[in-house]
Image (cartoon, rainbow, N blue to C red):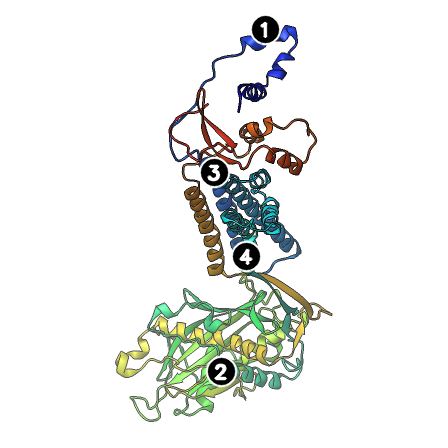
């Protein structure tokens, strides 16, 4: 190149023509602003790899991925997703999946922009290839370069292979977020919303409400059917067994307060195959008992003689005296347990829902002789109350049972245990009912294990010994339990009706989120690990190449100044036209350095050397 030509290139390089066109009043300012050029010092051989830009993009992708996992976890814990729940879930998953994809695309685009410089420095390229390599960070730019090389014979090179690999990684990386969609399912399960069903206590299978003997027998049958189901074991010598909760899972509770034993029962509700305790339909059955001993014609209460048994019943005598006299009159000394009650039809409608019954246990044979009568008998008062403990059954716990019939039903429940036969008193005024129960040790009866005072245990003055409190509590447990057993048995056998009139089955669909966590964590780990691997590979490939400012067009324009200096005109020319014009004056271009007047100069031109040593750069 001769001196004239060199001067022409230099004038173009320094933009002399533009400088000479400055207005006269601006020339002085331009000259005064011309300062000696400060040469930057390259401090490391590895180049300025954009670690900060890589780091915050990587952190963003990790952050958005974690939020996506949190969203999956929060929705996976819900039993059912409503319409708006599903809409919000879809919106959030699409939003944060897009943000993850955006972060990955930005990171891969940055790595593509970084990868341009070692590719340009690796060998000399035609001007059109240089143009395409500079645009390879965009997937379409990479594809254009590959297609350009495919259309030309002998154009495929290592550069093409690297760009192809980058394009594949770029596309897979941006679309990899879609793999999260394979880690969860929105399951839709069809179901039926069943109406609440309740036992119909207004049915004739419960009580006919006018045939007393039949209703009493029916309650006994109901109670017997539930006797085994409701495991209400009571160990009178172990106070820890007195209180029980949710006995046999039936919603039946037992408590002891002083000398009173109370059973609280929540009636059952049904929805389809599910059965559970009702929150509104409940009642209490409570009982307290007083034990007395009978010996040699005398009745002893708490060790004191309180009455003497007359030869015949006396209508003026206390009720417990007449009932005991009737039992001893109609039943022999070898009888089992007797449960008795003073019978008065007029009291079947008593709204107080309280009944007094008597339980009798005779010691046979007596230590005094075969025909001497020694007994322990209990007077028990049992009441049915509402769940709050108020007197009488209020509110009515028996669905469809008319309120006017409730006192009758309550008295039937409290009386059937003592009903088998009715006996008239000898004074022909009034009567009592009684039922005999087996006293065998393991007999399954309503009053098994009834306590009694015995000569062998309490000595010759046994009758003067107060009946132990645990005997009285055990008897109270037996009498309080019986009405509840009848109701439990009736619930199993009565027809069921809907709580709400006209209610019917309603089909529905339950949508729930099922997350396959191992697969989700695998996808998340693969995405993060893939980013680390790609960053490390690009960093390794860049090596000591000086990396230009990746997001500045001015920085790229600066290294193309030499190439563009020889292009005259074509201010509206396409990239293809400009490449053809440059190719007229150069055989090949590469990214590298060359020696300038004030130090090393980075450029893309045919004389650039792909070395970036330590030193001063112009």
Label 3, on which residue? 121
| Residue 11 occupies quadrant | top right
Residue at the limit of the structure toward the front, as seen here: 2
Q: Disc 3, disc 1: CB below 8 Å? A: no
What's the CA distance linking mark 2 and mark 4? 78 Å
- Label 4 neighbourhood size at 10 Å, few (<14), some (14-19), many (20+)? some
Q: Give the mark nearest the N terminus, 2 or 1.
A: 1
Please give the name of the residue rendered at 57% of the width and 44% of the height, measured from the top-left corner: 102
Q: Disc 4, disc 3: CB below 8 Å? A: no
Query: Which of label 2 and label 4 is nearer to you?
Result: 4
Query: Which of label 3 and label 1 is nearer to you?
Result: 3
Disc 3 on helix, strand or loop? helix
What's the CA distance linking mark 4 and mark 1? 64 Å
Q: Which mark is residue 179?
A: 4
Q: Which mark is residue 340?
A: 2
Disc 1 on helix, strand or loop? helix
Residue 198 visible somewhere in the drawing: yes
């Amino acid at each position: 190149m001769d001196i004239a030509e060199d001067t022409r290139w230099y004038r173009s390089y320094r933009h002399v023509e533009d400088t000479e066109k400055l207005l006269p009043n601006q020339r002085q300012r331009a000259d005064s602003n011309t300062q000696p050029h400060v040469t930057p010092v390259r401090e490391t051989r590895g180049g300025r790899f954009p670690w900060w830009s890589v780091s915050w993009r990587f952190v963003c992708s990790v952050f958005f991925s974690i939020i996506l996992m949190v969203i999956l976890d929060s929705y996976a814990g819900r039993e059912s997703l409503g319409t708006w729940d599903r809409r919000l879930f879809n919106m959030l998953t699409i939003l944060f999946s897009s943000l993850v994809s955006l972060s990955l695309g930005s990171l891969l685009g940055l790595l593509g922009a970084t990868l341009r410089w070692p590719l340009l420095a690796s060998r000399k390229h035609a001007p059109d290839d240089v143009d395409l390599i500079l645009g390879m960070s965009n997937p379409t730019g990479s594809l254009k370069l590959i297609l350009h090389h495919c259309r030309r014979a002998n154009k495929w090179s290592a550069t093409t292979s690297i760009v192809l690999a980058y394009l594949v990684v770029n596309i897979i990386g941006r679309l990899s977020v879609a793999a999260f969609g394979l880690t969860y399912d929105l399951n839709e399960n069809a179901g039926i919303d069943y109406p609440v069903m309740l036992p119909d206590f207004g049915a004739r299978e419960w009580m006919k409400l006018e045939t007393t003997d039949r209703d009493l027998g029916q309650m006994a049958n109901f109670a017997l059917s539930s006797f085994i189901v409701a495991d209400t074991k009571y160990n009178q010598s172990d106070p820890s067994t007195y209180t029980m909760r949710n006995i046999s899972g039936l919603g039946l509770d037992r408590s002891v307060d002083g000398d009173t034993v109370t059973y609280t029962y929540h009636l059952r509700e049904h929805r389809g195959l599910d059965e559970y305790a009702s929150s509104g339909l409940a009642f209490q059955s409570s009982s307290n008992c007083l034990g007395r001993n009978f010996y040699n014609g005398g009745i002893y209460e708490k060790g004191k003689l309180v009455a003497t048994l007359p030869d015949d019943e006396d209508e003026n005598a206390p009720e417990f005296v007449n009932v005991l006299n009737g039992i001893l009159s109609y039943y022999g000394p070898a009888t089992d347990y007797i449960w008795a009650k003073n019978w008065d039809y007029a009291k079947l409608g008593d709204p107080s829902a309280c009944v007094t019954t008597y339980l009798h246990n005779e010691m046979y044979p007596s230590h005094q002789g075969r025909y001497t009568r020694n007994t322990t008998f209990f007077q028990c008062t049992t009441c049915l109350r509402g769940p709050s403990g108020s007197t009488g059954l209020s509110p009515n716990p028996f669905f469809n049972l008319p309120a006017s019939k409730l006192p009758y039903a309550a008295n039937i429940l409290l009386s059937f245990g003592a009903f088998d036969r009715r006996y008239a008193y000898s004074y022909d005024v009034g009567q009592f009912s009684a039922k005999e129960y087996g006293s065998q040790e393991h007999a399954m009866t309503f009053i098994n294990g009834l306590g009694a005072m015995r000569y062998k245990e309490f000595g010759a003055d046994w009758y003067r010994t107060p009946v132990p409190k645990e005997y009285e509590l055990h008897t109270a447990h037996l009498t309080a339990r019986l009405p509840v057993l009848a109701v439990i048995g009736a619930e199993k056998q009565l027809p069921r009706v809907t709580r709400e009139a006209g209610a019917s089955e309603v089909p529905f669909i339950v949508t729930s989120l099922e997350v396959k966590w191992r697969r989700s964590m695998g996808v998340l780990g693969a995405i993060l690990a893939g980013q680390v691997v790609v960053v490390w590979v690009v960093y390794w490939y860049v090596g000591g190449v000086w990396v230009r400012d990746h997001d500045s067009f001015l920085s790229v324009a600066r290294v193309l100044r030499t190439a563009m200096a020889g292009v005259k005109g074509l201010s509206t020319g396409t990239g293809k036209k400009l490449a053809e014009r440059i190719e007229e004056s150069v055989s090949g271009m590469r990214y590298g350095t060359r020696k300038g007047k004030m130090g090393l100069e980075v450029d893309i031109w045919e004389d650039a050397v792909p070395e970036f040593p330590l030193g001063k750069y112009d």
